[in-house]
Image (cartoon, rainbow, N blue to C red):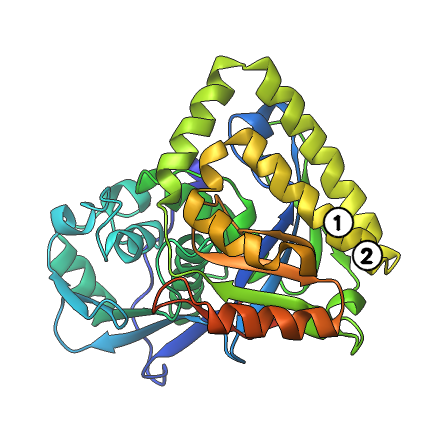
Amino acid sequence: MSKSLQTAPTPLREGWDEGCEACSPVRIDVAGGWTDTPPYCLSHGGNVVNMAITLDGQPPLQARVKPLCEPKIVLHSIDLQATEEVTTYEQLTDYAHVNSPFSIPKAALCLAGFAPQYCTQHFPSLTAQLRWLGCGICLTLHSAVPAGSGLGTSSILAATALGALSRFFQLGWNHTEIGYRTLLLEQMITTGGGWQDQYGGILPGVKLLQTEPGPEQTPQVHQLPDTLFTHPDYAPCHLLYYTGLTRTAKHILDEIVRDMHRGDERQLALLSEMKQHALDLAEAIRQNRFETYGRLIRKTWQQNQQLDAGTNPPAIQAITRLVDPLCLGYKLPGAGGGGFLYMVARDPEAAARIRHTLTEQRPNPAARFVEMKISHQGLAL
């Protein structure tokens, strides 16, 4: 708990900017998912391979902080078209609501020192603290990705909000500290989860992330070459398709974590296999073995289904049956069940046929292709 305590942000000084922005890519996990999740990672450590990506040429997650004249906090969600004013600590600490549009920004502000239990200084009220600060705060979030997408959106959006607050109030948090505080934030708002989502998005490029057993789950980062994703022979073969179907990751997480706590031997053996699989896939990337990489993506998807059969519902199977012969491998990023479908086509000609097939036979009006590219920036402050 002591690591989460924060000195109250200092009063504004003359010359501070009117506001600041932060933006982040999202992530695709390609191997080792779930090995980053407590309690498994606490006992065994985790190995994950993932990549930070932009969508349609843009980082899709944004946070903006700006000062207000009045001593209050205004929270705004652009994509959800919602606004809330916060004037008391009681309102600010009421963040444990998974479906609330403001659970993330409220918890982020608490971790930045705007709540008594997370601040080393005492103020009689939130209004008093904001008057001492010298301004109110407007925190605006925007996600250009649908909820339940499987791209780590909520975790990375939380990290983006923390990054914007750190920059605006000069808190000095680096990406590692932001990732750690994101893990705390997810526990606060009861979504739980592991560490790979936020680190997958705020850190750039393609990487192998590894942790050792123990309570301090700070990943060691091993950057991997991006040749398999950027070379003209391979870049067209990586396809991202929004299925128009969603499934809340929290329910999947609850089921799998429950089995972890029970010490299910079959599950533990599978998670151990998934850790090694992440190393195998990382090696295929290092050696630029495209076909091997694609087939290992297929194995990742098979492992996810062994962990939870609900990750591949009939509606998803109907989509993958259309493209299976044209793919080396494919998977739903994240917990599965819906969201985006990541496909590795056999070659550029197969990729073109996949695009034609899923464009002509859309499963629902929301389904569409989205252009993905490796992000070489990660969280930008």
Query: Along the horizontal axis of the image, is 214 left or right of 150?
Result: right
Looking at the image, residue 338 lies above or below residue 188: below
Looking at the image, residue 379 lies above or below residue 296: below
Helix, strand or loop at label 1? It is helix
Residue under circle 2? Answer: 291
Residue 220 location (% of width, % of height):
70, 46
Amino acid carrying mark 1 in the image: Arg
Helix, strand or loop at label 2? It is helix
Looking at the image, residue 20 lies above or below residue 228: below
Residue 115 location (% of width, % of height):
24, 48
Amino acid carrying mark 2 in the image: Glu
| Residue positioned 48% across, 45% down in the render | 336
Is residue 139 or residue 144 the one in the foreground? 144
Residue under circle 1? Answer: 295
In space, the residues marked 2 and 1 are separated at their CA atoms by 6 Å
Query: Along the horizontal axis of the image, is 111 left or right of 355?
Result: left
Q: Residues within 10 Å of mark 1 (few under 14, many from 20)?
A: some
| Residue positioned 37% across, 52% down in the render | 246
Mark 2 touching mark 1, by CB under 8 A?
yes
Is residue 13 or residue 164 the one in the foreground? 164
Q: Which mark is residue 107?
A: none
| Residue positioned 35% across, 55% down in the render | 112
Residue 231 location (% of width, % of height):
79, 75
Residue 42 location (% of width, % of height):
57, 27
Is residue 301 or residue 145 the one in the foreground? 301
